[in-house]
Amino acid sequence: GTAGAFDFRLPNVLSISASGHKFGESICGTGWVVFRQRENLAEHIAVTVTYLGGSSDSMTLNFSRPASGPYVQFYKLLRLGKEGYMQKVENQMQTTAYLRHFIANLKHPNGENRFQLLDGGDTRCLPVVAARLNPNLGLHYDDVDMQHALSESHWYVSGYSLGFENPATHEFENLFTDVGQETTMFRIVVKSNITQSLAENLADKIEKVLTVLDDLDHGYETIHSKIQALKDKGGKSEADVPILEHEYAGDKFSRTVRKTIFAQKLMQKQREQRSTSAIVSQHIC
């Protein structure tokens, strides 16, 4: 069947935004937003300022912003055109379909599927794969753990908790009615720079990382709870807390899982903080 309405045909949709750098081929920091009507613009976003002898409306998070994003975006729109963007998206969708089929068919050693797909499939979805580890497997790790393990191979696949903090009550609540707030999922955003060979590399890393995580004992605590404990004791960021230490010897994947790595890293960071100051960076996708 056809996809349902997702735009201003729905009365509760007040604005539509999209990423100019993920799908528009512009530089990082470029994004688009369209509001249904002006009254839906929050006052802190739409600011009227006196500039160059006149009055100007600035609809950004702050008044002065670099112009490189809109310039690059406009150039790409002119350079690629509708046909160019269609070809680009078709290629992204093919690569996405490869990853989706890999995830759908990957099996646990007991014969069950590793994952459950959560997106609209190959033809009714953005070039994004959304899935979660199969809850029927009763695994002692979750999608956020897999995210951190994959980051050791420089792949940044976003894991999410299906709960949210209610701004009115400051209570952590369920995002959906059919799963609990502790449930997790992940997504893979397939941009145009993700080639078929890179997609195959990601698939290989996912399979190997899951094998490692399967080998951990059932006393394993989820990585994000340990990260929070580290932060409570003065740690800086998730980037400070690797889940695995591994090395590659050709195509052979070997690893050393250290149960005390978090305590070791904490002591190491405390020693470093006493002797020097460091800038901590975090990769975000």
Image: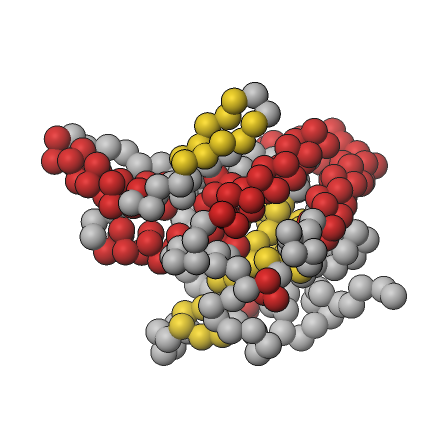
From this view, report whether residue 147 is shown above or below residue 41. above
Figure colour scheme: secondary structure
Relative to residue 194, is residue 227 drawn left or right?
left
- Residue at the image point whose x is 49% and y is 47% from the top: 215
Relative to residue 84, is residue 119 drawn left or right?
left
- Residue at the image point whose x is 55% and y is 64% from the top: 138
Residue sticking out furthest to the top: 250
- Place of residue 123 in the rendered image (x, y in percent of width and height, measured from the top left): 81, 53
Residue 113 shows up from this direction: no
Relative to residue 226, is residue 183 drawn left or right?
right
- Place of residue 93 in the rendered image (x, y in percent of width and height, measured from the top left): 76, 43
* Of residues 94 and 107, the one drawn nearer to the viewer in this rendering: 107
Residue sticking out furthest to the left: 274
Quarter of the image that includes the N terminus: bottom right
* Of residues 35 and 21, the one drawn nearer to the viewer in this rendering: 21
- Residue at the image point whose x is 73% and y is 70% from the top: 9
- Residue at the image point whose x is 59% and y is 77% from the top: 178
Q: How many marks?
A: 0
- Place of residue 220 in the rendered image (x, y in percent of width and height, measured from the top left): 40, 55
Residue sticking out furthest to the right: 1
- Where is residue 179, by image quadrant? bottom right
Residue 104 shows up from this direction: yes
- Place of residue 273 in the rendered image (x, y in percent of width and height, measured from the top left): 16, 36
